[in-house]
Amino acid sequence: MVGLAFLGAIGFMLAAAGGGPGLSARLREVPHRQVEGAAGRIAWLELHGPMVAGDMGFAGGAGITQDTLAMLERAVDDPTIKGILLHLDTPGGSVTDADRIHSAITKARAKSKTVFVLMDDLCASGGVYAAVAAQEIWALPTTVTGSIGVIIAALNASKLLEKIGIEDTSITSGPNKAMLSPTRPVDPEHTRILQGVVDAMYERFVTLVAQGRNLPTEKVRALADGRILTAEQAVSGGLVDHIGDADAALDALQTDIGQGSLDIVRYEVEPSLADLLRATLGRPDPQAALFAQIFGAPRAMYLFSTFGSAR
């Protein structure tokens, strides 16, 4: 018990201090393919898991989004990097996190970096949102994608609490302060307000897909009812350009850059001491962290989810 208490104290101190060296200091490059006399390099980046800013780990981990943003920034600032392959395996995540990655890809392109996306097993909702900023999108033959839409997830237990004699007596400054409270009956006005937020975020999603994929808005809207798509269906719908594996996508990226043979380097983030401590003490499952974010407070998500209903 003393040992765990000591580790816990160290973990909290690391959290307060930022967990050790910053992300940029912990980024490393791992050679993937090298050629003699290379004219430059391609950076291969990966994002695996829900797009959330923090993993809610014991000592406050940076989270998947920050890792990916740091990698993109490194690739953009490196003049030897001519192209980027962003490998996505994600159900999406928060609206803001998906938008940050979309924006970072857009900035990379503005700095004359050619960016391709490779969709892995699952690249849905916020994954699609981010991917459409790239010049070209590839998918594996078995990729599941789509799920274009927005969700604000909530559970309501007011009937259960009434049944067992528990009453919410919270005091609020206004009638709309406790929207989606799980302890009070659903207020139609709250639903109307939140539906407006969902609709606005949905329109932004549809607009960016239409712009990024050069598709008519109505064609995107026909696919943007939350449905999931196979790789073949995504190609037919214009959301994906090609089906192939990582080697095929990398070869196509090199051809598109058109500067001769290029080295390929993979970016990785070395774990911090805080990360190692979290692993020692039992790091929370990322899916559990995502669940906590969804239901911790009402928030709009570009997320492939089994919660929610159409209105």
Image (cartoon, helix red, strand yellow):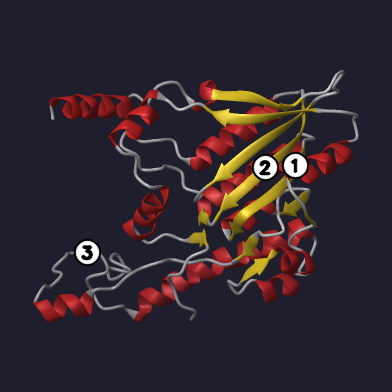
Mark 2 or 1, closer to the camera: 2
The residue closer to the viewer here, 83 or 260, is 260
Residue 86 vertical placement versus 193 (above, below): above
Element under disc 3: loop
The quarter of the picture where the N terminus appears is: top left
Above/below status of 176 relative to 273: below
What residue is shown with label 3?
Answer: 172
| Label 1 or label 3, whichever comes before in sequence order | 1
Q: Nearer the viewer, mark 3 or mark 2?
A: 2
Residue 176 lies left or right of residue 248; in this view the side is left
Q: Mark number for residue 86? A: 2
Residue marked by disc 1:
115
For the residues bearing labels 2 and 1, Cβ distance under 8 angstroms: yes
Outermost residue, left side: 165
Residue 207 locus on image (x, y percent): 68, 63
Q: Which residue is drawn at 36% across and 81% down?
A: 188
Which one is earlier in the sequence, the residue at label 3 or at label 2? 2
Image-based side of 206 in relation to 70, left or right: right
User: Picture coordinates of residue 160 (x, y %)?
Assistant: 19, 77
